[in-house]
Image (cartoon, rainbow, N blue to C red):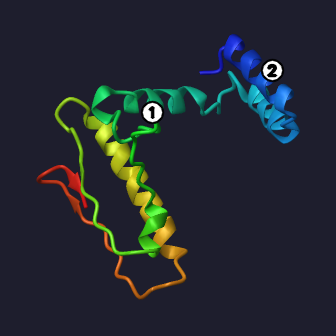
Amino acid sequence: DGTPAALTALRTALEATGQHAMLRELDARARQAGGAGDPAPVLADRVALLDRPAFAGFFATGPDARPFALRSLGQYPLRVRVDLPERGHAEASRLLTRLLLAQFTAITAARTDTTLFAGLVLDDATHAVT
């Protein structure tokens, strides 16, 4: 959300690791903050929508997590079903559906091996993406 403390901590971490390109990005972001076209508040709201216990397993990154990458579609046959918790988190479910659709479209368009069929099924009746 662009709080000064968070930006200062990020700047310190970037300086410590010598990430000069990222420091330039951070400076550009700081100049955008608070302007009429600042995308940060909307983005922060969307990220907050996804920060729910119902989605914790989907975004897990720990040692026991089994992360899924759509990039693996071009490597071997795979079927994944994502059940979206529409009742309590309708807006978050819609956002996740859009993210999955965008990522699927980008990955399948970039595939070089087209011997495997790739399809995406959006099922509004059961609130699932397969």
Mark 2 lies on residue:
12
- Mark 1 is surrounded, within 10 Å at the Cα level, by few (under 14), some (14 to 19) or many (20 or more) other residues, namely some
Q: Nearer the viewer, mark 2 or mark 1?
A: 2
Q: Which residue position holds label 1?
A: 46
Residue 111 left/right relative to 66: right
Up-down: is 66 above or below 61? below
Q: Which circle marks residue 86 in the picture?
A: none
Percent position (x, y) of residue 25? 79, 37
Relative to 10, residue 81 above or below: below
From the top left corner, tell me how far across and down residue 36 is, in percent.
65, 28
Residue ID at (68%, 21%):
34
Left or right: where 100 falls relative to 91 = right
Residue at image point 34% right, 50% down? 97
Left or right: residue 57 compared with residue 45: left
Tell me if residue 122 comes above or below residue 4 in the rendering.
Answer: below
Give 15 or 102, whichever is nearer the viewer. Answer: 15
